[in-house]
Amino acid sequence: MDTIFALSSGRPPAAISVIRISGPKAHEAGERIAGLLPETRTTAVRELRHPATGELLDEALVLRFDGPASSTGEDIVEFQCHGGRAVVDSLLSALDGLDGLRLAEPGEFTRRAFENGRIDLTEAEGLADLIEAETESQRKAALALAEGGLRKQIAGWQERLLGLSAEAERAIDYAEEGEDAADSGLSRDCGALASELSEWLSRPRVEPLKDGVRVVVAGPPNAGKSSLINAIAGQERAIVTDIPGTTRDHIEVPLALAGTPIVLTDTAGLRETEDQVEAIGVARAESLVESADVLIWLGEPDSTPTHARLIRVHPKADLLSEVHAGAIPVSSLTGEGLPALLEAVGELAKSMLPAGDAIALNRRQARHIGEAADALVHAAKTSDPVLIAEDLRLGRNAFDRLTGRAGVEDVLDALFSRFCLGK
């Protein structure tokens, strides 16, 4: 295996830069440049010299880690050097000239940690999310994954599954004539674990936290949707005219509402139309209404779509008109009702986000936990221990895909490409 190196801190200039080397020749490379390395997991100040010319490149703090007890599971050397561009470039150039060393690819240090069993796939996903986190809530959710919160939970589930599998095998080999899995409690225990997994699947997911809660504003043409979007955004983001059908495609406005990330979406007016372009916009609007996390409806009560998180708005409240029962009167012109509307949106949006530092599943994780839950549900309905054993095997395979032990090659390249160089 190649020994890799990269700048692991931000691009210079900086006060300090960290250059990391990992692989079978890491210690040899470190000695070629820094001389005698310190004891493992200790630091020492060393002169860094070019291995070919002996030229002094910098004086830096040197750290040594011995595999497998390192972040990558391999031998590691780190140089904490001065963060000038010339210093960093000279050290990287010196390392590039050593046999058996090459510049790391983005995410390769973390990928080696995964491949060497230092972390599982859920922890790697947490690290990627942590690097990309822009809000405090995103940081907490990512850290819960990166620190192994989900891994520990999965380990408990896997241990229980193995126990159930052992019980199923015992029932196959040694069950008395006439005894079935229900009599031994095996089916009941499968159902209990399935219920626990289903409870996890019902929790808020991480996608709304990362991508923003999708708040869709919908209704008939000229209902005031675009004006409302502009009023909430505080700027002219959507074109407003008296001509019906002005908005022909959806417009997205990312916002933070009391610290909650949302994506406010303006849509084409919902109506029958002969205009081919407008018809495409209407079709997209109907699709967005169905997929909305929160729906703000500006139409008549009798045409209100069915939605789990619906807010009905009586628009143009500055005009004299009867307010529909259950609707929030709002005027985009005067600002009347906007605080009440935003409060209602914020409450519904927060209900979709994980609480505090709770572990939130992403789509991939939820899919595999769902596969395991389905297998356990089927096992709970079965009395034949042979069939139960097969269902439990499928459940174990789903957990192996969840943690990255099997069947995830198509996921790895996409995941680790999200990491920066040197991570």
Image (spheres, helix red, strand yellow):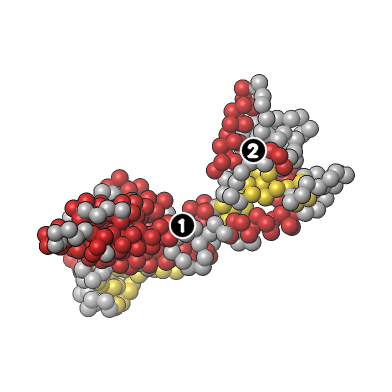
Residue mark closest to the camera, 2 vs 1: 1
x and y percentages locating residue 175 in the rendered image? 15, 62
Residue type at mark 2? Thr
| Number of residues whose C-alpha sits closer than 10 Å to that of mark 2, classed few (under 14), some (14–19) or many (20 or more) | many
- Of the residues shown, which amino acid type is indicated by label 1? Ser
For the point 70% across and 48% down, the residue is 312
In-image side of 256 versus 367 (left or right): right
Please report the residue visible at 33 percent of the width from the left and 72 percent of the height from the top: 60
Residue 399 is tagged as: none
Q: Position of residue 408 (x, y in %)?
A: 28, 49
Left or right, 186 with reference to 365: left
Locate residue 93: give its quadrant. Answer: bottom left
Which residue is rendered at x = 65% and y = 31% of the image?
248
Residue bearing mark 1: 202
Name the quadrant containing residue 1.
bottom left
How much space separates mark 2 and mark 1, taking CA atoms? 29 Å
Which residue position holds label 2?
Answer: 267
